[in-house]
């Protein structure tokens, strides 16, 4: 059996029957890493020996009938933004000294270990996860497995590329402006940004209210299973939510036919590539045919990019101000511009932007009294040439210019998921985004599951 084509759910079912073992699955994942990571550059660290030892322990648990979780023994990766005991967390930066004690697990890493997942290694990120593509001067360019000339997206591009290429079934990314949903759309996988605080973070992100962690997988069921693992509270995050009252693995199968969905093809102001627009519209029609009540309408807000830019750049400046003297010459030149831009704002500017963020959240809260979910394209474009922050020749000034569907919902802290909707004529994946009211992670997953059923993704 070629288990690199299986979902995590299918792997675990095979473990239970003895058809496959965690050791075999891990060996196969490591084989694919050896074969494909040289061209995709999804991993910045692979611990093959450690992964095999974890898999052997899982194999014993399965053999004895005592798995410690629904995902025990599933090969997974973790973005190099999360502290991981025994491995350096360099965050794509040459300014972070790898020669220091690495003796703390982030909440995400701790939950993965406690539930028996096999940690293969850490995935690439742009420096400090600052942009919507994945490249840096430390590890180079991460490429899209569907077309190696194109970007995997970012900032969780390494995680998306790893999952899409079969280099591990699951990964965990971060999302401060679309960083899970962007690469999920470009690479043709499922990526969820849950409600803010649903997955605890430590240390606290300088990007504050924008910051989320989330699961990335090849199926909606796997995404729900991984969210069950990650959603447990951790005392180190004072903003963490209470534990869920039910499991996401059960909620994903909720019958959502008959619910009201708003479909906004442009949010009222986005210029969308016609081919992308047609693919997403077709997928929305399939959801309508399956029983969702679809109404084409916009939420009614204007582009919040000016406020987002203040929140994003001041967070980056605060973080970079803690770096050693001389770091200005070592950081990504684009990040250095963000650093300098962030320093131009006052506390009053920041509070004003945060007030705009809160007002947008209130507007969307009222919108969801009328519509259960909002559906949009995830991105207005398909993956473009790797190694560039914006599509070459586009005239765009920065990554937020081509991600207008994602960052507004970091500001509102709502759950939002990207699910594959189809492919362009050139074979590149296209994502559809489903947004729900705060705390409706279960609903967003259930609507995503319906889309997956009516528009299966190979």
Image: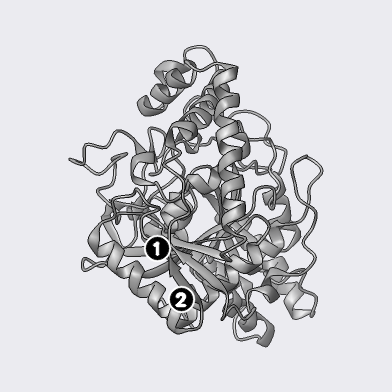
What is the residue that sits farthest to the left in this orientation? 393
Mark 1 or mark 2: whose residue is earlier in sequence? 2
Which quadrant of the view contains residue 134?
top left
Residue drawn at (49%, 43%) of the image: 177
Q: Is any atom of residue 367 visible in this view? A: yes
Residue drawn at (53%, 68%) of the image: 27
Q: Which mark is residue 386?
A: none
Real-space Cα distance between discs 1 and 2? Answer: 20 Å
Disc 1 crowd, CA 10 A, few/some/many (<14, 14-19, 20+): many
Residue drawn at (38%, 77%) of the image: 285
Residue 358 horizontal/vertical position (percent): 61, 39
Disc 2 crowd, CA 10 A, few/some/many (<14, 14-19, 20+): some
Nearer the observer, 446 or 322: 446
For mark 2, what is the residue?
5
Looking at the image, residue 37 lies above or below residue 27 = above
Residue 89 horizontal/vertical position (percent): 58, 38
Q: Secondary structure at mark 2?
A: helix
For mark 1, what is the residue?
431
Residue 214 horizontal/vertical position (percent): 59, 54
Residue 185 horizontal/vertical position (percent): 40, 59
Q: Which quadrant does the C terminus fall into?
A: bottom left
Nearer the observer, 437 or 33: 437
């Amino acid at each position: 059996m070629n288990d690199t084509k299986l979902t995590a759910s299918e792997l675990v079912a095979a473990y239970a029957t003895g058809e496959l073992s965690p050791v075999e699955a891990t060996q196969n994942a490591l084989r694919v890493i050896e074969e494909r990571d040289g061209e995709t550059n999804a991993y910045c660290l692979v611990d093959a020996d450690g992964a095999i030892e974890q898999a052997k322990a899982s194999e014993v648990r399965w053999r004895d009938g005592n798995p410690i979780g629904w995902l025990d023994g599933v090969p997974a990766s973790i973005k190099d933004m999360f502290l991981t005991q025994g491995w350096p967390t360099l965050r794509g930066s040459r300014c972070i000294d790898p020669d220091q004690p690495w003796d703390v697990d982030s909440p995400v890493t701790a939950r993965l270990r406690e539930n028996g997942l096999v940690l293969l290694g850490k995935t690439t990120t742009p420096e400090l996860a600052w942009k919507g593509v994945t490249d840096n001067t430390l590890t180079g360019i991460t490429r899209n497995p569907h077309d190696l000339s194109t970007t995997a997206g970012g900032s969780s591009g390494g995680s998306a590329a790893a999952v899409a290429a079969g280099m591990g079934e699951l990964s965990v990314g971060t999302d401060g402006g679309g960083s899970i949903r962007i690469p999920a759309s470009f690479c043709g996988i499922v990526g969820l940004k849950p409600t803010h605080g649903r997955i605890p973070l430590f240390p606290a992100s300088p990007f504050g209210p924008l910051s989320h962690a989330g699961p990335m997988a090849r199926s909606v069921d796997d995404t729900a299973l991984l969210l069950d693992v990650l959603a447990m509270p951790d005392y180190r995050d004072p903003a963490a939510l209470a534990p869920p009252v039910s499991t996401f693995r059960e909620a994903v199968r909720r019958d959502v036919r008959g619910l009201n969905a708003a479909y906004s093809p442009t949010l009222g102001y986005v210029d969308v590539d016609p081919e992308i627009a047609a693919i997403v519209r077709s997928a929305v029609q399939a959801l309508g045919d399956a029983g969702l009540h679809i109404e084409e309408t916009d939420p009614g807000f204007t582009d919040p990019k000016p406020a987002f830019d203040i929140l994003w750049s001041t967070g980056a400046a605060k973080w970079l101000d803690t770096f050693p003297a001389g770091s200005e010459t070592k950081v990504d030149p684009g990040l250095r511009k963000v650093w300098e831009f962030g320093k131009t704002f006052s506390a009053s500017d920041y509070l004003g932007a945060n007030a705009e963020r809160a007002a947008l959240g209130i507007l969307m809260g009222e919108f969801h009294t009328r519509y259960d979910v909002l559906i949009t394209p995830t991105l207005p474009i398909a993956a473009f040439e790797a190694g560039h922050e914006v599509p070459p020749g586009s005239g765009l000034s920065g990554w937020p210019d081509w991600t207008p569907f994602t960052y507004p919902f970091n500001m509102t802290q709502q759950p939002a998921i990207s699910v594959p909707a189809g492919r362009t004529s050139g074979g590149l994946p296209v994502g559809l985004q489903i947004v729900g009211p705060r705390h409706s992670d279960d609903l967003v997953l259930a609507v995503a599951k319906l889309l997956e059923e009516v528009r299966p993704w190979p």
